[in-house]
Amino acid sequence: MALFWKVYDRIELTIAVLALVAMVLTVFVAATGRTVGVPVGSASTFAQLFLIWTCMLGGDLTLKHGQHIRVSALPDVVSPGLRKSMAAFNVLLILAFLGFVAWHGWELVVSNWARTLGASGLSYGLVTLALPVGAVLFAITLVRRLFVLGLEHVYEAPAVKPESVL
């Protein structure tokens, strides 16, 4: 099972980096084209497509490493039992919200699939697909962290290298 997660994480990281590189390159092509008087009409559209995928994948990678912003003022002053209950409540709320986003995000994908993405000729559904895919990836990561780190440490950054934890 560890090999599966290692490959899974590597694929996600690779796609995120490729999306980031593609976004930078398309912005560069758009800016260079405008500068030399040969604008590339669909370059900014592609940059937007790569941006949303970079954001969703990058957000999941951040969650995997426990690096999301968290406010710990209240959990730090309550008893360990109450802290654990608060974490359980938060996990349930987050998973419910991610399920909601995935469900309605998929409806958005289906309703926008026939719409074209600017001058690119691609489906606008490729942009909206990032929302349900990102929600599912976040849910998978949260559940993984829950099983590996436990309820009381689910939101904390691991003290060891992330690759050895998740």
Image (cartoon, rainbow, N blue to C red):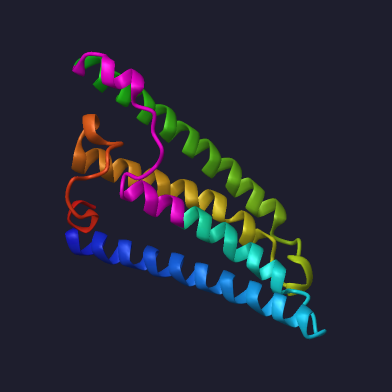
**Does the segment drawn in magenta span residue 68?**
yes
Q: Is residue 16 above or below residue 109?
A: below
Q: Residue at x 27, y 45 (%)?
A: 144
Residue sitting nearer the eye, 88 or 27: 27
Quarter containing the N terminus: bottom left
Q: Position of residue 133 (x, y in %)?
A: 49, 53
Judged from this view, the residue extending furthest toward the right is 37
Of residues 60 and 78, the one drawn nearer to the viewer in this rendering = 78
Q: Position of residue 108 (x, y in %)?
A: 66, 48
Q: Quadrant of residue 2?
A: bottom left
Identified at 41% across, 38% down, the residue is 69
Q: Residue furthest front?
A: 35
Magenta region: 58-80
Using the rendered view, name the quadrant where residue 95 is placed: top left
Locate residue 20, reporting x and y percent.
51, 67
162 falls in the magenta region: no
Q: Residue at point 54% right, 60% down?
A: 53
66 to 87, vertically: above or below: below
Query: 32 left or right of 149?
Result: right
User: What's the residue at 59%, 46% (across, down)?
Assistant: 105
Residue 42 is situated, as x and y percent measured from the top left of the image, at: 74, 74
State left or right for residue 127 relative to residue 114.
Answer: left
- On screen, residue 142 above or below 33: above
